[in-house]
C-alpha cells in the first residue's frame, strides 16, 4: 500500500471517533453483569482467534485467563480512542494481541484465516451488519466457530419504545442501535449451522434482551 493510500485508510478508520464514550465505557456499571458471558465467549480458545470491535479490551482478561500456548489472538477496533485503551489493557493483562484499526465490514485478513471469530456487543454498533457478517464468515475457516453476545430488538411495547428512543440512544452511546434484528440475521445465513443460542436474563429496558450463542461455518460453504 502506498503512503497516501495508507493515510486514506487511517483517516477512514478515524471517522469512527467517540472519545467520551471510550472514556466512560470502562466505568459503566456493566462489567460484573457480563462476566459469565465473557467467560462463555473465551472458553477453550486455541488456534487463531479474531475479535471484532474489541472496544477497550474488556474481553482480554478473560481470554488471557483461558489462553493456551497455541492461541494467536487478533482484534480489530476502528475507534482510535477505544484502540488506545485496548492496547493498554492488553499490556496490563499480558495478552499478546495483534490489534488493528479496521472495520468489521472490511477485514484485513485472507479467506479462511481463523478458527474462531468473537463478536461481543458489537453487532449493535457496526454500521453495516450484513456486510460484517459476510466478512466474519469469509475469514472464518469452514468448520470454524462464530461466538457472540449481543443485545437485540425486543418484542411488543418494549420494541416500540426502543424504536422511539433509538435516535437519541445511538447519538449518546457511540452509534449503538437498540433495534437490531441480529438473531434472524445470523440464523438465516445459509453458510452457518446453529450450535447454540440462548436468550439471557440480563439487562434492562431499553438495552434488552441479550442473546449469546455459537454458530459454525458449514464445511463446503461458499460465500459470495
Ligand atoms: C459497545 S462497544 C463493545 C466493545 C467490546 N466488544 C466489548 O465487548 O465491550 C462497540 C464497539 O464497536 C466498535 N465499532 C463501531 N463500528 C464498528 C465497525 N464498523 N466495525 C467494528 N467495530 C466497530 C466501537 O468503536 C466500539 O468499540
Image: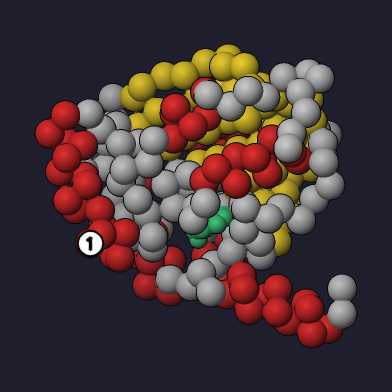
Let me know if residue 184 appears in the view.
yes
Residue depicted at x 58% and y 14%: 195
Place residue 181 in its image quadrant.
Answer: top left
Task: Residue lying at the far right in this picture: please name it.
Answer: 2
Q: Nearer the viewer, residue 110 or 34?
A: 110
Q: Nearer the viewer, residue 9 or 74?
A: 9
Q: Is mark 1 within 8 Å of ligand 1?
A: no
Q: Secondary structure at mark 1?
A: helix
Tell me: 52 left or right of 95.
Answer: left
Image quadrant where one finds the N terminus: bottom right
Place residue 190 in its image quadrant.
Answer: top right
| x and y percentages locating residue 17 in the rendered image | 48, 72
Residue depicted at x 42% and y 19%: 198
| x and y percentages locating residue 114 in the rendered image | 78, 37
Q: Please, is residue 199 above or below residue 50 in the view?
A: above
Image quadrant where one finds the C terminus: top right
Visual colour scheme: secondary structure
Task: Residue lying at the far left in this picture: please name it.
Answer: 157
Residue depicted at x 57% and y 16%: 194
| x and y percentages locating residue 57 in the rendered image | 55, 53
Q: Residues within 10 Å of mark 1 (few under 14, many from 20)?
A: few
| x and y percentages locating residue 200 in the rendered image | 34, 24
Q: Please, is residue 195 above or below residue 126 in the view?
A: above
Tell me: 167 left or right of 55.
Answer: left
Tell me: 7 left or right of 2.
Answer: left
Task: Residue lying at the far front in this picture: please name it.
Answer: 224
Q: Please, is residue 114 above or below residue 56 in the view?
A: above
Let me know if residue 93 appears in the view.
no
Residue matched to label 1: 168
Instruction: State the count of labels.
Output: 1
Amino acid at each position: 500500500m502506498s503512503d497516501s493510500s495508507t493515510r486514506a485508510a487511517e483517516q477512514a478508520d478515524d471517522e469512527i471517533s467517540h472519545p467520551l464514550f471510550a472514556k466512560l465505557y470502562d466505568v459503566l456499571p456493566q462489567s460484573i453483569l457480563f462476566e459469565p458471558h465473557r467467560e462463555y465467549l473465551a472458553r477453550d480458545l486455541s488456534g487463531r482467534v479474531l475479535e471484532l470491535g474489541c472496544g477497550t479490551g474488556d474481553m482480554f482478561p478473560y481470554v488471557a485467563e483461558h489462553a493456551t500456548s497455541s492461541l494467536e489472538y487478533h482484534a480489530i477496533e476502528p475507534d482510535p480512542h477505544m484502540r488506545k485503551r485496548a492496547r493498554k489493557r492488553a499490556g496490563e493483562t499480558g495478552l499478546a494481541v495483534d490489534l488493528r484499526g479496521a472495520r468489521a465490514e472490511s477485514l484485513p485478513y485472507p479467506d479462511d484465516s481463523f478458527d474462531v471469530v468473537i463478536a461481543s456487543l458489537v453487532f449493535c454498533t457496526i454500521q453495516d451488519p450484513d456486510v460484517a457478517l459476510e466478512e466474519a464468515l469469509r475469514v472464518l475457516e469452514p468448520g470454524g466457530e462464530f461466538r457472540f453476545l449481543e443485545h437485540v430488538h425486543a418484542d411488543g411495547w418494549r420494541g416500540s419504545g426502543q424504536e422511539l428512543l433509538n435516535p437519541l440512544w445511538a447519538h449518546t452511546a457511540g452509534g449503538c442501535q437498540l433495534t437490531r434484528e441480529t438473531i434472524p440475521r445470523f440464523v438465516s445465513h445459509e453458510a452457518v449451522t446453529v450450535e447454540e443460542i440462548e436468550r439471557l436474563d440480563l439487562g434492562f429496558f431499553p438495552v434488552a434482551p441479550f442473546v449469546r450463542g455459537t454458530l459454525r461455518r458449514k464445511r463446503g460453504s461458499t460465500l459470495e
